[in-house]
Image (cartoon, rainbow, N blue to C red):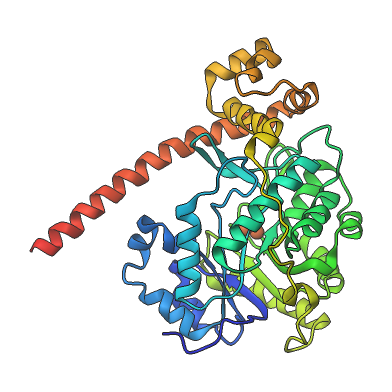
């Protein structure tokens, strides 16, 4: 049982990784909070590899305030939500008394295919309305409001009627959610897609930002920035973070994300220390009274339930996009005659078809390559899992 409260974590912390558990605990005076990845616990294969009896998790929970972060919701997919995932998340949050949760504003799964990489939502009102529906369904299921994170996108959907900041604003207006502002994602998107990040902040409802992420990345040979989560935070991100902390008066949580190259751990702590210096330069040592968006989230009454059929264009767009990434046959048909190819997914609106034909071909290659890689990787993980499962059974029989 945990001995400290996870009711309202505050300050600067780290995305928790099993592999640096002991180092993290050793620095608990400087790590204000940990962000637990819910998938690590609700997907059995992962837990069984790294923390079979959850001893590390319980130790982390007993020592440092924790928040939870999900990865697999795919809130933007025009399909029913994954009930198993929601149930697992709800149980995990309840079991460990965690009150703060966040997920991503994106989609990555449709027609049974999961890309494991985020695709940008089209910045359109139809997408706002669909996300609103799924946000409320998720909130109802897990029993609490949660923050939505802005993602890095390899290519923006072209010809959309809203900009990204306006889209995020509309989402907060419709759902009453708060935002998890990933500052590295803003930096990367602004560099890769040529916009001014400060202007982006000007247009964003910064009072809605409740949490922030910082992560490291690198510039690829083609000049594009990637949030690989394997490097120290890039120099260009720090002034943006400073600006964001000043503007986001209600932000209480900052998490440094590092997934690999976690050693020497001092390089992680160097980023934590820099982030703390900036955070506490502008914020008090302890949080003030709760702000409106933490206290009064819109009640559920009066939230309309839509049918997926009302979003057939958005659904047709998403199915066609996924087919372009995962199917040679569809790619060929799409190249020959886009309208004929997308008609099989019920997509006939020329505006929506244009959003597909105008998407950056270079980025489509990136997704195709990654899809093939992940297919192979999944097979490998499956085999490893089976082997370990057998080994465990054999051990029990001994
Ligand atoms: Fe995230
Ligand atoms: Fe993030």
Q: Position of residue 50 (x, y in %)?
A: 37, 64
Q: Is residue 274 visible?
A: no
| Furthest-left residue in this view | 398
Q: Position of residue 250 (x, y in %)?
A: 79, 75
Q: Residue at x 50, y 71 (%)?
A: 93
Residue 81 locus on image (x, y percent)? 55, 48
Residue shown at the point (78%, 43%) measured from the top left: 192
Q: Nearer the viewer, residue 317 or 204?
A: 317
Q: Indicate which quadrant contains ligand 2.
A: bottom right
| Residue pictured at 34% horizontal, 60% vertical | 49
In the image, 319: left or right of 295?
left
Q: Front-most of 31 and 115?
A: 115
Res 6 → quadrant: bottom right
Residue 307 in which image quadrant? top right
Which of these two is toward me, 110 or 120?
110
Q: Is 284 above or below relative to 369?
A: below
- Please provide percent x and percent y for residue 376: 41, 36
Question: Residue at 36% across / 68% down in the picture?
Answer: 51
């Amino acid at each position: 049982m945990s001995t400290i409260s996870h009711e309202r974590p505050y300050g600067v912390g780290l995305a928790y990784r099993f592999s640096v558990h002991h180092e993290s605990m050793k620095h608990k005076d400087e790590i204000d909070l940990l962000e637990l990845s819910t998938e690590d616990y609700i997907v059995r294969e992962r837990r069984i590899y790294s923390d079979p009896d959850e001893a590390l998790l319980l130790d982390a929970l007993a020592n440092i305030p924790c928040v939870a972060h999900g990865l697999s919701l795919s809130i933007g997919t025009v399909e029913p939500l994954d009930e198993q995932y929601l149930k697992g998340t709800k149980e995990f949050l309840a079991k460990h008394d965690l009150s703060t949760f966040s997920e991503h504003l994106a989609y990555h799964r449709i027609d049974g295919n999961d890309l494991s990489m985020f695709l940008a939502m089209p910045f359109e009102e139809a997408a706002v309305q669909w996300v609103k529906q799924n946000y409320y369904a998720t909130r109802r299921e897990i029993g609490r409001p949660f923050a939505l994170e802005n993602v890095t996108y390899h290519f923006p959907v072209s010809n959309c009627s809203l900009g990204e900041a306006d889209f995020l604003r509309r989402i907060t207006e419709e759902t009453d959610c708060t935002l998890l502002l990933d500052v590295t994602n803003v930096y990367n998107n602004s560099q890769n897609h040529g916009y001014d990040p400060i202007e982006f902040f000007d247009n964003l409802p910064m009072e809605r930002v409740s949490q922030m992420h910082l992560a490291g990345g690198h510039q690829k040979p083609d000049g594009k920035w990637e949030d690989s989560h394997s490097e120290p935070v890039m120099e260009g991100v720090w002034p943006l973070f400073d600006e964001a902390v000043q503007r986001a008066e209600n932000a209480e949580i900052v998490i440094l994300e590092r997934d690999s190259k976690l050693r020497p751990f001092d390089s992680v702590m160097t980023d934590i220390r820099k982030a703390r210096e900036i955070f506490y330069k502008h914020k008090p040592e302890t949080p003030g009274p709760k702000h409106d968006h933490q206290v009064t989230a819109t009640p559920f009454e009066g939230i309309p339930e839509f049918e997926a059929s009302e979003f057939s264009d958005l659904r047709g767009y998403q199915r066609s996009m996924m087919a372009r990434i995962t199917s040679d046959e569809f790619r060929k048909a799409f190249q020959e005659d886009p309208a004929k190819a997308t008609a099989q997914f019920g997509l006939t609106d020329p505006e929506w078809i244009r959003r597909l034909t105008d998407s950056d071909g270079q980025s489509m290659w990136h997704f195709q390559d990654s899809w093939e890689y992940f297919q192979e990787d999944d097979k490998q993980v499956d085999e490893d899992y089976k082997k370990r499962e057998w080994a465990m059974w054999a051990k029990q029989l001994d």
